[in-house]
Structures are given as structure tokens and as C-alpha cells.
Image: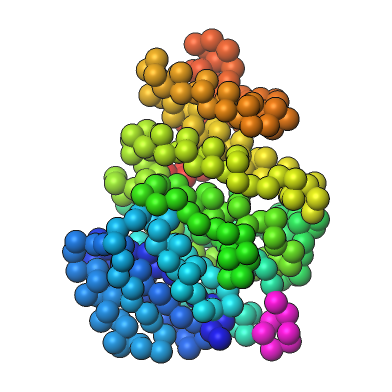
């Protein structure tokens, strides 16, 4: 068995996928790389199969009909033979020196018989066109670096800090047991991946290494504000999916800290929906905001009242036009400070 599977979903990625794949090859023979061509119309498939021929024992190229990013991740989980699993988007890459350290840790744990459920590492927001806005997210205030931990050991998250796909390296079996099956033809599915399996995680280790480089700044990226506003219905769908598919009771039975974290994550999702609907500003958009909150209340009144309290999402529901302006202004300030899109 390989120690880790790197799944690389690709769609029309010919101009940047080689940087990604080359960075993963540093992991050596203990890693498998699955390049998933999601129905591309450019030379993505040709490049993927060229790598497969060059490294037949380490790389698999898979062609499939287009189903979106989530479909590519699903295929990666289905085919994964590694003990651990990592999604690396085709326009992103892993730091080569950090990856060597990461692989040494995997080999060390394997040699002494330790199996982890989740490994957490730092990630870098790389604003290629505005390098002054690049910044790192670490978790030194959440977990003790290099120590075996559980959710009960978790510290307090900063307002701008939460666990996202780029930071997470799951044991493959955890993802399969959690039934992670991301919606097809849908953006923002990485949020589901980042929270749905957490209630099955027991053994955690945080490595204080700057491993994942998240390329950001392209105009067509899903996190770009104008693109996000056009796809607001998908953001709402993913938020409702998390509401109904993250097992809050299971989280509570494991640790109150984990339950509160999941509620905080849902609050962030609600905040994004609320703010972008306010930015759109039409009567239809404001109606969608009310429908979304009613959906939360109908599903679980306790979650509704928690989110409407002193949470980020609650603060986006300040009454009147002045309240709406404060919500949007506060979000814009946070965006400039954190530079998350």
C-alpha cells in the first residue's frame, strides 16, 4: 500500500497542471498520484497520460466525462489506494521542502505503528499577481505541533481561521466511511469535504509546515467576488447541504468543542450567503436570504437560534438598511485584512 494518494482533478488545466504534478513527484515512491481529467477540451488528457507513461508505478491518468470538481474528488476517493488522501487542485502545488518533511513524518508514523485519522498542515494563499497580499494560515494556536491530539485538545480559532480542504490530509478510510460523495456540477464543494468527515476523526496531528500553496487571483476563480455572486445559488445549496449532512449530534457526543467548531463553520457559510445576497441587493436576493434562514429554522430551531445570536451570521442580519450596510462593510474590511479572494 502507498502511504498517500494525491488526487489532482483537472479541467482544461494544460497551462498550469505540470507545476502541480512536478511538485507532487517529490513525495517519491510512497505516494501515488491520480490525475483525473474531467472531460477537458484542451490537452489536459495528453499531458496526464504522458506523465503516466513516464512514472507508471506512481501516476495514474483517468479520463471521465465532465462532472465538475466534486466529481473529480469523488473519483479520486473511489480509486485511492493510499493510506492517506489529499486533494491538490491542478492550479495549486505543494512546497517541495515541506513535502519532504511531511513524507518523513508519514514514514516515521508507519514504522512505529501509529495510524492517524487526520493530519493538518499550514497553507499559503498565493496571490501571484499581488504577492504583497500572499499570507500563511497556520494552526499553532489550535493544536500543539507534532503531538498526537484529539478534538478535546483543540484550542480557540481566530475569527479568520478555520479548517479548509487545503489544510487537511485525511486517512482514506475515514472519507469512505463518512460516505463523502460531493455534488456534481457544483462549486464550493470543498466545504463539504472539510467538515462532513470530522465526527469520525479521533487521532489528529498538526505539522507546523507550510505545505500547500493555494493559487488565488484569477478572474475566473470560483472565489472571485463577481463569480461568487453569479453562483450564489450554488453557495446556498452547499450551505443547506452542510446543515443537513453534518451530524451535529455525533459531533456533540465526541466533544462539545467539535460541535461548536462545526456550528462556527456553518455560521461562516451562512455569512457568505448573506453578504453576497446583500451585495446583489435585488428584491429576489433579499427574499432568498429570508428563505435560507427559514430553511435553517425548519430543519433545526436550536441551530437557527444559535446562528441568529452573537455569531458572524447573526451579525449579518442586523435590521434595516443601515444594518445591511454595516454587514457588507464589515465583510469587506475582513476581506482586505485576510485577502481570502
Question: In the rendered view of the protein, which quadrant contains the N terminus?
Answer: bottom right
For this rendering, which residue is in front, 241 or 108? Answer: 241
Q: Which residue is pictured at 40% across the width and 74% down the height?
A: 34
Q: Along the horizontal axis of the image, is 315 left or right of 336?
A: right
Q: Quadrant of residue 73?
A: bottom left
Magenta-colored span = 109-115
Q: Along the horizontal axis of the image, is 205 left or right of 269?
A: right
Q: Is residue 130 visible?
A: no
Residue 246 within the magenta-colored segment of the rendering: no
Q: Which residue is pictured at 19% across the width and 61% down the height?
A: 41
For this rendering, which residue is in front, 13 or 213? Answer: 13
Q: Quadrant of residue 144?
A: bottom right
Q: Which residue is pictured at 63% across the width and 79% down the height?
A: 105
> In the figure, 141 relative to 5: above or below?
above
Q: How is the image coloured?
A: rainbow
Q: Where in the figure is residue 239, as x and y percent of width and height? A: 53, 39
Q: Where in the figure is residue 146, as x and y percent of width and height? A: 71, 71
Q: Where in the figure is residue 63, as x and y percent of width and height? A: 30, 70
> In the figure, 296 relative to 322: above or below?
below
Q: Residue furthest left?
A: 42
Q: Along the horizontal axis of the image, is 87 left or right of 37?
A: right
Q: Along the horizontal axis of the image, is 224 left or right of 151?
A: left
> In the figure, 240 relative to 38: above or below?
above
Q: Where in the figure is residue 266, as x and y percent of width and height? A: 61, 39
Q: Is residue 228 visible?
A: yes
Question: In the rendered view of the protein, which quadrant contains the C terminus?
Answer: top left
Q: Which residue is pictured at 70% across the width and 77% down the height?
A: 115
Residue 112 within the magenta-colored segment of the rendering: yes
Amino acid at each position: 500500500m502507498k502511504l498517500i494518494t494525491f488526487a489532482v482533478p483537472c479541467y482544461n488545466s494544460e497551462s498550469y497542471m505540470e507545476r502541480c504534478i512536478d511538485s507532487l513527484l517529490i513525495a517519491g515512491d510512497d505516494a501515488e498520484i491520480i490525475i483525473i481529467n474531467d472531460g477537458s477540451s484542451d490537452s489536459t488528457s495528453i499531458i496526464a497520460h504522458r506523465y503516466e507513461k513516464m512514472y507508471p508505478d506512481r501516476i495514474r491518468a483517468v479520463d471521465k466525462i465532465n462532472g465538475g470538481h466534486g466529481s473529480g474528488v469523488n473519483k479520486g476517493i473511489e480509486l485511492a489506494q493510499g493510506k492517506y488522501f489529499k486533494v491538490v487542485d491542478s492550479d495549486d502545488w505543494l512546497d517541495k521542502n515541506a513535502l519532504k518533511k511531511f513524507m518523513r513524518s508519514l514514514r516515521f508514523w508507519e514504522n512505529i505503528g501509529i495510524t492517524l485519522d487526520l493530519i493538518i498542515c499550514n497553507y499559503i494563499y498565493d496571490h501571484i499577481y499581488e504577492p504583497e497580499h500572499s499570507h500563511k494560515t497556520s494552526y499553532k494556536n489550535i493544536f500543539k505541533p507534532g503531538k498526537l491530539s484529539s478534538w478535546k485538545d483543540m484550542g480557540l480559532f481566530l475569527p479568520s481561521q478555520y479548517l479548509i480542504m487545503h489544510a487537511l490530509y485525511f486517512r482514506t478510510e475515514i472519507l469512505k466511511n463518512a460516505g463523502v460523495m460531493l455534488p456534481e456540477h457544483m462549486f464550493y464543494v470543498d466545504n463539504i469535504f472539510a467538515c462532513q468527515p470530522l465526527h469520525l476523526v479521533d487521532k489528529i496531528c498538526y505539522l507546523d509546515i507550510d505545505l500547500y500553496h493555494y493559487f488565488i487571483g484569477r478572474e475566473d476563480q470560483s472565489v472571485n467576488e463577481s463569480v461568487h455572486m453569479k453562483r450564489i445559488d450554488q453557495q446556498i445549496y452547499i450551505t443547506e447541504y452542510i446543515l443537513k449532512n453534518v451530524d451535529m449530534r455525533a459531533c456533540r457526543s465526541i466533544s462539545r468543542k467539535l460541535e461548536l467548531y462545526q456550528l462556527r463553520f456553518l455560521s461562516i457559510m451562512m455569512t457568505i450567503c448573506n453578504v453576497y445576497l446583500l451585495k446583489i441587493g435585488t428584491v429576489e436576493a433579499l427574499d432568498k436570504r429570508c428563505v435560507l434562514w427559514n430553511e435553517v429554522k425548519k430543519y433545526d430551531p436550536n441551530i437557527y437560534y444559535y446562528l441568529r445570536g452573537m455569531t458572524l451570521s447573526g451579525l449579518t442580519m442586523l435590521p434595516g438598511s443601515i444594518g445591511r450596510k454595516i454587514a457588507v462593510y464589515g465583510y469587506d474590511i475582513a476581506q482586505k485584512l485576510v485577502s481570502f479572494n
